[in-house]
Each structure stands twice: as structure tokens, then as C-alpha cells.
Amino acid sequence: MYLDIKVYIRTMSKGKSESLTGGSGVHVFLVLWKASRAAQAYAEKSISELEMCASDFAALEALLHKGPLPVNEIGKKVQLTSGSITVAVDRLETKGLVERRAHGTDRRARIVHLTKAGRKLITRVYADHAADMERLASASLTRAERKTLIGLLKKIGYEAAGALEQSDEEAIA
């Protein structure tokens, strides 16, 4: 992924007369990218008072909504590498917010559970965060627009994921 948007624009439009306005593929990407980064910054500000990073918040939120999970499953749900999620769970365990317990049938596996303190914290914090996200969404979009946007974002996301999967399969063959 390009970190510098100007490099991305130069690379994508070099030698082409493709406009960066009017709904071209590059324009769609730029608008999506900028909106995503702004919304991400807004979401991170929403949890900044917690003195925890976004990955710790995401791990706690996953446990709140999905229940106890193996470390690797938490990582998949919050899109962190195995090393990063292990470090996050270690931090949360040190703070007394989660605990690792033995798996019922697989002696090799450890399952991460919220502690009472962890459940109390993430329940309160998630409610505040959800309210912040609702304020953002309701200030900018109607319910109908939200539904449309969700459908469109899923459509482009599924298309991108499918194209990547096909490309990976072709590379293996």
C-alpha cells in the first residue's frame, strides 16, 4: 500500500489522461481512502482517553461481542498479525482485563476470556464509542444513505477480495 498519496497519484496517472474527478477508478479510490483515514482518526480519538491503543480496544471489543476466542482468532477478527495480537493480549492480561485459559479439549490451545474488570471496562467504553460513531454517521448520512453506502462498500470490498484471491490462485498455478 502506498503511504504517500501523491506517489500513488503519480504512479496511477503517469502517461494517462485519466481524470482524478468524475468517478474514475482512481478518484473512487482516493475518496474512499481519504474518508477511511478521516473516519479512522475520528474513531481513534473516540478511544484515546482510555490510555490504550486501537488494537487493544479492538481485541476487547471482539471478546465482548464474540465471546472467548483463541488468540489467533482474535487476530483474524481485528486484522492483526499473530505477533501483534500476542503482544496485545499480553498487555491486556498484564492490566487484568483478559485471562488465558486452557481449551476444554485441545491441550495445546489457550482461550482468551474477558475478566470481570475487562468486561466492565469494554462494556462502558464501547457504549461511549458507539455513541461517538453514531454522532458521526447521523451528522452526515440519513438511514437510507447509510444502507446504500454499506451495500456499495461491501460490493467494492468483495470485488477487490475476489480479484486478489484469483490473482493469488493464478500465481500458485
Image (cartoon, rainbow, N blue to C red):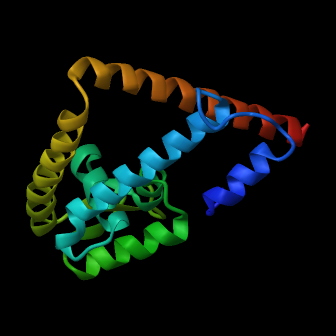
Based on the displayed image, in which of its 4 quarters is residue 172 positioned? top right
Placement of the N terminus among the 4 image quadrants: bottom right
Q: Identify the residue at horizontal 91%, vertical 37% (top origin).
A: 173
Instruction: Inspect this view and state whether residue 100 appears.
Output: yes
Q: Is residue 26 above or below residue 159?
A: below
* 56 displayed left or right of 126: right
* 163 displayed left or right of 56: right
* 101 displayed left or right of 22: left
Q: Is residue 113 above or below residue 97?
A: above
Relative image position of residue 137 (x, y in whole percent): 23, 37
Q: Identify the residue at horizontal 18%, vertical 34% (top origin).
A: 138
Q: Is residue 4 above or below residue 136?
A: below
> How many marks can you see?
0
Based on the displayed image, in which of its 4 quarters is residue 48 positioned? bottom left
User: Considering depth in this image, is 135 or 62 the residue closer to the camera?
Assistant: 135
User: Considering depth in this image, is 56 or 114 the residue closer to the camera?
Assistant: 56
Relative image position of residue 28 (x, y in whole percent): 57, 34
Q: Identify the residue at horizontal 21%, vertical 45% (top origin).
A: 133
Based on the displayed image, in which of its 4 quarters is residue 97 positioned? bottom left
User: Considering depth in this image, is 43 or 173 the residue closer to the camera?
Assistant: 43
Relative image position of residue 82 (x, y in whole percent): 53, 65
Instruction: Inspect this view and state whether residue 97 appears.
Output: no
Q: Identify the residue at horizontal 13%, vertical 59% (top origin).
A: 125
Residue at the extreme bottom of the image, as rendered: 94
Q: Is residue 32 above or below residue 78?
A: above
Relative image position of residue 37 (x, y in whole percent): 44, 53
Residue at the extreme right of the image, as rendered: 173
